[in-house]
Image (cartoon, rainbow, N blue to C red):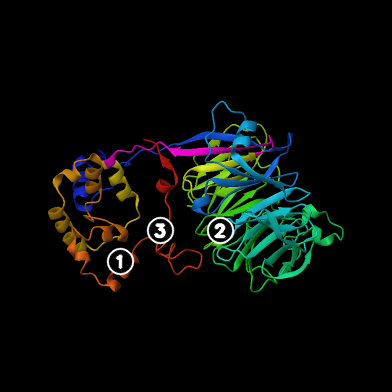
Amino acid sequence: MEFSRSRSVFVNIGLRELNGFRVRKRPFFADSELICREIAGVAVEHDGNRTPPLAVSFCKTSRNSQLFAVSDEDGHVSLFNSSKKFASSATHQENTENARFRDWIAHYNAIFDISWIKGDSCLLTASGDQTIKVWDVEENKCTGVLIGHTGTVKSMCSHPTNSDLLVSGSRDGCFALWDLRCKSSSHKEEFCINSTGMVKGAHLSPLSKRIRRRKAASSSITSVLYLKDEITIATAGAPDSALKFWDTRKLKAPFAQASPQSDPTNTKEKRSHGIVSLSQDSSGTFLTASCKDNRIYLYNTLRLDKGPVQSFSGCRIDSFFVRTMISPDGEYVLSGSSDGNAYIWQVNKPQVDPIILKGHDFEVTAVDWSPSEIGKVATASDDFTVRLWNIENNRCTNTNATASVSRVKRRVTALSNTEAKERLEMNREAESPQKHSSLLDDDYNNNYQSTHIIRTPESQKKKTSSSSSLSSLSSSEEDIICERTPETTFNSPSSVLNPPSSVKRRTIRDYFLVTP
C-alpha cells in the first residue's frame, strides 16, 4: 500500500512557524486616473488667412508662465496669453483676438523651431531660409542672424545655464555650435553671427555614404539637445534610429551611441527608422526619442549602454513633424500623432494604455508642457489651431490616507534593528494613539513589522521635534544614512547630469492638480 507523499496541514503550519511565509501585501490605494480637459483653442491665422502651426513653446520663467509663442508655415511668430478668460461658446477666431497680444513676420519662410532664452526676453527662431534669428521680444526687433547652414534648420537647443550658447541641426546633415556674443559683421541693422564649430555628415546612412549625390532627407539632422552636464550634445537623424552623443570640447567623433536596435548599421537585420524628435526632463536624467516605427523610446543618460529602458506605443508617427515632450519632472510623456490625437503615457507604467487628448481634426505636430503652471499643456495641429489642456488627477484627497500614502510611497532608508527599536520607542511616546487609527496605517505597521519603522532622510529631519535621537547624529552619520537609500547611486549629487541636492525635484503630486 502506497502512502501519499503530500505533506499534512500540520507539517505546513510547522514549517510556517519555523521559516515564515510571504504574504501578498495589499495595495495602499487604487491607481488614480488622469482627467484631461480642453481649456481653449486659438486659430493660427493672419489677415484672415489660416496657416498650420509648426512649433509651440511656453515661457520658461514663472512670472511669464502664462505666455506661449507659436510659429507657423508662413514665417509668423505669435505670442498668446493663456491666462485670459475663454468663453465656452467662443470660436477659435474670437479666442485668438482675445489672447494674442503680439504678431510679426520673423522669416519669409517656414519656422520649424522656437526657443525662449535670457529670462524670456529673447526668442530664437529656426527657419527654412537656412538661418536662425535672435529676437528682442520687448522691443520687437531682430538683434542677430546666425548664418552658416546650407539647409533648413529643423531643431535647436540653448545651453542649460548659458543662453548665449546653443546648438542647431539642419537638413544639410550638419549640426553647429553658436555663441551669440561672437558677432562678426552687420547687414541692414542686423548682426550676422558665424558658427564656432560645425560637424558635417553626423548621421549619414551606410547607403548614402556610397552615393555622391544624395538627397537631403537621407542625411538630415532632425533633433538636437544640449544636455544638463553642459558639455554633451545629443543628436538624432532621419537615416537611422541611432542617437549620438558628442563632447563639445572634442567634436571629431561621437563618444557614445544608443539605439533601440542591437546594431543600427546592420540594415539586413532590421529596417532602420529615423528619429523624429528628442526631449529631456529638467534634471537631464531621462531622454525620449520618438521614432518612425510609431514608438517612443526612453533612455537613461547615465546608462546609455543598456539601450532604451522603456518604450511607449499607441500613437502614429507618419511624418517628421510629430514631436514628443517628456514632462519636466520626468513622470509623463506627451506626444503628437498623425491620427489627429495627442497621447500621454505614465513613465513608470508603459504597459498601461495612454491618455488620449481628442479634439483636433488633423495631424498633431508640436506639443509642449508648461514648466511652471501645473498640468497645463499645449498641442498644435494641421487643423490651423493650437489647443490648451488642463490635466488633473482624480486621486482621493482624504487627509489621513494622503498623509499615510505620501509616507509609504517615498523610497525609504533601511535602519538597523537597534536604531529601529530606539526610534520606535521614542515615536510611541511622542505620538498619540489616534494617529494610527486608519486602515492604511494599520496595514503599514503590520506589513513592515520586521523593520518597525521606516523613514526617508527628509522625513527624519522633519521629525526632529519628536525624535531627540536625530539631533545627536553627526553630519558624517547622516551622510551614511543617506547613502543607504536606493536612489543614492541614481540621483547622486556628484552626478554631472543632476542638480544639487538643495534643489527639490518635483513629484507627480506637485505637477498635476488634485481635484477636490
Mark 3 or mark 2, earlier in chain: 2
Is residue 191 shown above or below 67? below
Q: Nearer the viewer, mark 2 or mark 1?
A: 2
Which mark, by number, is residue 481? 1
Q: Is mark 3 on a helix, strand or loop?
A: loop
Badge 1 density bin: few <14, some 14–19, many ≥20, Cα 10 Å? some
Say which residue appears at 59% left-offset and 69% top-offset: 231
Q: What stretch of residues is rendered in magenta?
A: 381-399
Say which residue appears at 50% left-offset and 68% top-offset: 496
Badge 3 density bin: few <14, some 14–19, many ≥20, Cα 10 Å? few
Report if residue 435 lies within the magenta region: no
- From the top left corner, tell me how far across and down residue 210 is, in percent: 83, 61
Mark 1 or mark 3, earlier in chain: 1
Mark pair 1, 3: CA separation: 19 Å
Mark pair 3, 2: CA separation: 21 Å
Q: What element carries label 2?
A: loop
Determine if residue 312 is in view.
Answer: no
Q: Residue furthest front?
A: 139
Q: Which of 21 and 202 is in front in this view?
A: 202
Kindly identify which residue carries mark 3: 504
Q: What element carries label 1?
A: helix
* Three-letter amino acid code at the position of disc 3: Lys
Q: Quadrant where the N terminus lies? A: top left
Say which residue appears at 17% left-offset and 55% top-offset: 427
- Mark 3 in CB contact with mark 2 (< 8 angstroms): no
Mark pair 2, 1: CA separation: 39 Å
- From the top left corner, tell me how far across and down residue 288 is, in percent: 58, 52
- From the top left corner, tell me how far across and down residue 336 is, in percent: 62, 41
* Three-letter amino acid code at the position of disc 2: Gly
- From the top left corner, tell me how far across and down residue 334 is, in percent: 56, 44
Is residue 23 shown above or below 305? above
Q: Which of 476 and 103 is in front in this view?
A: 103
